[in-house]
Image (cartoon, coloured by chain):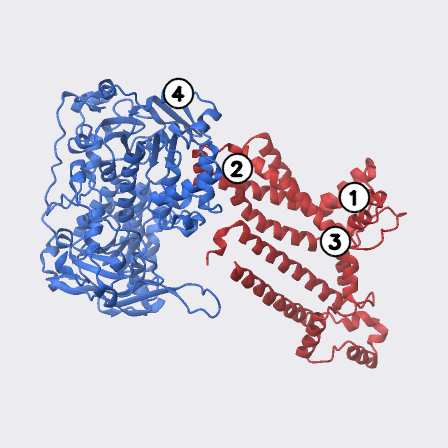
Chain colours: A blue, B red
Amino acid sequence: MPAAAKEPVQPILEVRDLRTHFDTDAGVVRAVDGVSFHVMPGETLGLVGESGSGKSVTALSIMRLLQDQSRIAGGSILFCGRDIVTMDAEQIRALRGDQMAMVFQDPMTSLNPVLRIARQLVETMVIHGRRDRNSALGHAVQLLGRMGITAPERAVDSYPHQFSGGMRQRVMLAMGFSNEPALLLADEPTTALDVTIQAQILDLLRELNTDFGAAVILISHDLGVIANVCSRVVVMYAGEVVEEGPTEALLSDPKHPYTWALLNAVPRLDRYIPGQRRLTTIEGMPPDSHQWPRGCRFAARCPFRVEACTEHPELLPVGPTRHSRCWVTQTGQSLPKPALPLVAPAAVKKVPAADREVMLEIKGLIKHFPVPKQNFFAPREAVHAVDGVDLIVRKGETVGLVGESGCGKSTLARLIVRIHEPDAGLIKFTGHDITHASAAEMRPLRRRIQMIFQDPYASLNPRMMVRDILAEPIRFHGLTDDEAGTQRRVEELLGLVGLSSTTAAKYPHEFSGGQRQRISIARALAVTPDLIVADEPISSLDVNIQAQIINLLIDLQERLHLTYLFIAHDLAVVRYISDRVVVLYLGKVMEIAPAEALFDRPLHPYTRSLISAVPIPDAAIERMRQRIHLQGEPPSALNPPSGCRFRTRCPMAAARCAAEEPVLHEYRPDHWAACHFTERV
Amino acid sequence: MLRYLTSRIVATFVMALLATLIVFLIVSLVPGDPVLSQLGDMAASNPEIVKAYRAKWGLDLPLYEQYWIFLTRLLNGDLGISITSQRPVMADIAQYAPATIELGTIAFILSVVIGVPFGIAAAVARDSWIDHSARFISLIGVSSPVFWLAFIMLTVFYGWLQIAPGPGRLDPIDLPPPRVTGAFLIDSALASRWDLLHTAVAHLVLPSIVLCAATLGLITRTTRASMLDTLGQDYVRVARAKGLRERAVIVAHALPNALIPVVTLGGLAYANLLTGTVMTETIFSWPGLGLYTFRSALALDIPAIMGMTLVFAFVYLLINLLVDLSYAVLDPRVLKR
């Protein structure tokens, strides 16, 4: 360990050749297969990899919180010099939550719903004998305040369901830091949160690392998050560490092709190349965990592989502070920047926007969801989900829809495909008024508007074969003359989304998430639609799969002249794929502009803070960035603020913003914003 | 909290009123003329007698008037006169109910006290011998028909081994204790008749085992499934990550969550035990509501049938109300709005 040799300080955690195996019916899965790394006191270490790479299992092994069927099969985990692997249950219990704490991914499910916050915080301190009940309660209040929770005295008496996801993650952090541990493991702590809240939590995590001096292992699939927090990174692939090094060097000059692929699969907000229409993706999927390949585990997908790759490489130094498990970079050479063909935008994109045919027109669209009355005489309240939205989508373009969760993105999508009935306003699809079209009137139009859903696991019927999933809409709309024609069309569709025709006889559970999303796309395409409404179609996928799906969507658009309404919370992806972008906040449009203008010269303060909250996978840039932090969380859509809805969180809000609602105005050609002070942004 | 309580109570009253209407309508509309079954062939062939009989019981009035009379009397605790026993139905019910409540409650307590810990242990020690035996016992319990189990129990423990007393609430030579509540366990204890208490307990053993078998199986199984589900939740892992001892993780973190569905089922099961005793009471000659219902149904004793149906409906409503109210204590999310 070169880093340890220079430092006289001992590492706080040293994982040596850790092997964690799962016993399954199909054999032993070597989920973690010889992982070694160390963490210095107070250090922030990032652990990166796609799902199935073994990063979470490594963390659970360190905490000895593995499920029943998994076991540590070898290696050692030295924590302050003591081996965690050989500790008995009582010794490891005394360590957990005391010197070693863990924060998990989903704050919505991590707090016990039937116990008060106070109780859940206090027991952590009391069980380890750090404090008595009274002083623990005082400390809990103090910690919650430190975590940025307003009125912590009241908060401790609440139950978890009274808090939002971001607040709950703050409670989880308070719990993690309550005994001032020497090591905190955070497993994807911000993945379930909005970018604005993510930025707040990451800031907090950095501050806590400085204040408490606790070492942090941050597990994430998002290199931007890692760049934001960590000083050193360990990259995992197929149960092994494939690269290790200081964040800045590793992200700017990756020495392992997998790191290289991860970096280039993510579209970057700060590095948009006009004309770039494809992301770099690596082929295939991670190897079968029941039987890792004999040679380099990444070789099958590696664009740089050489003959030596049939032999398994060791994790060897590639520079003073860096290690890589790769034959190619052993000689010290760097991996080249990806050569991407800069495709000219499809012909349709060249036609000036205003001249293109209007496909979808929305005016003053309103949808309120009534909530149960407080009591019999109380006025009826409603969630103002979509509250007066105007929008035009032209033929052949991609309109991106962004905003925090609860801003009405999904409701708007559902209104357009008429899953919901609007309360007021107008929806016109290619000239037909479908605002209040009946189910029978909608039926022929449904062929022309299709939807792709977020969760590829829930949106395919598990009892239907792929063949039937794709054939059903074709048969229903009578698009083919006979059954043979339908089957030909099914094969054609599978080819279109890059699946082989042999998959037709399989059931959805036999596919990975990315493949399922391809099936969803094929299903939407089955009826040759004009408009596709995609509601977060890539947000549950790994980055490389995301890139593949984005490429597929762009490909299909060029070949089939599709029009997309693309909903996503990932701004970099939206920028990459969209021609125009709509920013929603609490059911209202804040800004509409061509993607380039919106990201380069945003007019609305909300757009600006959203962009500023996105972490960029470059440590140097992350350090330099001036952030405009959005404080707090969006107000309740039950009773939205008067005037401008954003004023309660806006850094520029003035008296006028409360009194007068700004109208959506065209400040520049095709660039609309709803703000009184656009000239000041 | 208060809003939740009032809303549940009001809802219960509305449902109770609906229950009276439905019971009344069903009894009025189903075929089977009580006059013919009560008067016998000779009298029924005489139109004068039939007419007088109808007038006497108000059966010639329009339906809504009959309902109104029924409702006002019901509010005064008057369920009418049983045609077979010629006594107020209310008095009959008061006489038979304690035996059933005693049996049903004992069976319920048995199934909860055994089933819940058994289910928890089975879930915590998954795939161990405890788990397997829990599964075996609940399978037997759920799948044995009451009449079969009752006869097997009587044959083995009363007939062959002679360690259990025969049918009935007491031995034939015993006189019941002075009536206070009607439940022999309580009454004999109040009268300090320990010998009687002993006999009463002995007589309860077989019928309560028979009655609770199915419920015990159901509760064990539900507790196990619910506990397993809860143990897999993120907050349980968080509790372990805090360094809590396994006992505290299970008792303080998992159990309160796991019990929520068990309470729902338990309420329903208790109502079923109180109202579903017909077979057990018949076999064990247990003078309770089940037996009474059975006899009334045979005799087409309409007032008694109406009375019993209403009592059973009210039992369900009351227990459901209690379950709803217990949610308020068990699950803070219920009071969210």
Q: Which mark is residue B250?
A: 2
Give the spatial CA distance, label 2 vs label 1: 35 Å
Q: Which amino acid lies under the numbered mark 4 shown in the image of this protein?
A: Asp
Q: Which residue extends farthest right?
A: B173
Residue drawn at x 75%, y 78% as measured from the top left:
B58
Q: Chain of mark 3?
A: B
Q: Chain of mark 1?
A: B
Residue A226 pos. (x, y %): 25, 36
Residue named by callout 3: B100
Residue A539 pos. (x, y %): 29, 46
Task: Name the one closer to the observer, A543 or B36.
Answer: A543
Q: Which amino acid lies under the numbered mark 2 shown in the image of this protein?
A: Ile
| Neighbours of disc 1 within 10 Å: few (<14), some (14-19), many (20+) | some
Asked where in the image residue A674 lies, by quadrant, the reply is bottom left
Q: Do the residues at discs 1 and 3 belong to one chain?
A: yes
Q: Do the residues at discs 2 and 1 belong to one chain?
A: yes
Residue named by callout 4: A83
Kindly indicate whether the residue at mark 2 contacts the one at mark 4 (C-beta within 8 angstroms).
Answer: no
Residue named by callout 1: B201
Mark 2 or mark 3, earlier in chain = 3
SS assignment at label 2: helix
Give the spatial CA distance, label 1 vs label 3: 14 Å
Q: Do the residues at discs 4 and 3 belong to one chain?
A: no
Rendered view: A479 above or below B189: below
Kindly indicate whether the residue at mark 3 contacts the one at mark 2 (C-beta within 8 angstroms).
Answer: no
Residue drawn at x 84%, y 46% as measured from the top left:
B192
Task: Name the one closer to the observer, A120 or A417.
Answer: A120
SS assignment at label 4: strand
Q: Which amino acid lies under the numbered mark 3 shown in the image of this protein?
A: Thr
Asked where in the image residue A451 lies, by quadrant, the reply is bottom left
Rendered view: A19 above or below B138: above
Q: Quadrant of the N terminus of chain A?
A: top left
